[in-house]
Image (spheres, helix red, strand yellow):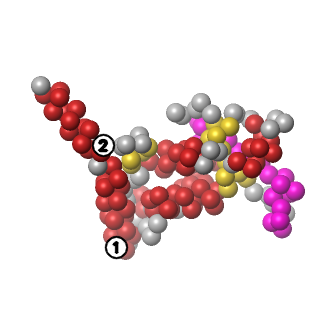
Amino acid sequence: MNTNIENEDKAAAIAMSPETLEAMRAINNTLTVAGVRPHFQAHYSHAQLNVHGIMDLIKDILRVAQAEFPRNIENSELRKIAVAGSMFTSDILAEVQARFSQGTTRYQIQSVKNCLSTYGRADGTIGRIKLTNPEDQPRLCAKPRCKWYRVQGKGE
């Protein structure tokens, strides 16, 4: 009997994920205005999606954008497809902000970059494509950008 009540409570809490997420955004907005440093603010957590924290959020953004490919696709004949389907860091950051951190100091650009280049690549869940100059046109810069994708079958 007690297990049924616990399961019902858990189901009710999970069903409240959108409201909980909005409450965390409001709290972070308040904390930002109050000058509270980002690492003391609430983390992203969406129990219905089983997506918790910035790393899970980034992987979910890549999944939803269909930027999922086999590891090392950038070294294959399918590179053009992967380049077209993967995402720039700036696009990922914009989506992080739209989903959670808009108007707050939580999950700034350096947090997103660290998750992509350090943690995601290290644990094998995120792949990077270093663009060539022709692939990064019409941008006029000596150093081409990178695009990111979620490695299929990793971190699911």
Q: Is residue 106 magenta?
A: no
Looking at the image, residue 103 lies above or below residue 144:
below
Which numbered disc flags the more N-terminal residue, 1 or 2? 2
User: Badge 2, how many Cα within 10 Å: few under 14, some, many 20+?
Assistant: some
Looking at the image, residue 31 lies above or below residue 123:
below
User: Badge 1, how many Cα within 10 Å: few under 14, some, many 20+?
Assistant: few
Looking at the image, residue 156 lies above or below residue 39:
above
**Can you give x and y, in whole percent of width and height, for residue 93 in the image?**
57, 59
Q: Residue at x 19, y 33 (%)?
A: 6
Disc 1/disc 2 C-alpha distance (Å) = 30 Å
Q: Which mark is residue 14?
A: 2
Q: Residue at x 31, y 60 (%)?
A: 23
Instruction: Work out whether residue 95 can be spotted.
Output: yes
| Residue 66 image-quadrant placement | top right
In this rendering, the count of numbered labels is 2
Query: What amino acid is found at the position of numbered circle 1 in the picture?
Result: Ala
**Can you give x and y, in whole percent of width and height, for residue 24 in the image?**
34, 58
Taking the view exactly as shown, the residue that stands out farthest to the right is 134
Element marked by disc 2 = helix
**Dominant secondary structure of the residues highlighted in magenta in the image:** loop
Q: Residue at x 45, y 62 (%)?
A: 101
Q: Is residue 15 left or right of residue 151?
A: left
Q: Is residue 57 left or right of residue 11?
A: right
Instruction: Give the residues in magenta.
Output: 120-140
Q: Which mark is residue 34?
A: 1
Query: What amino acid is found at the position of numbered circle 2 in the picture?
Result: Ile
**Can you give x and y, in whole percent of width and height, for residue 134 in the image?**
87, 56
Q: Is residue 133 magenta?
A: yes
Residue contact at pointers 1 and 2, CB within 8 angstroms: no
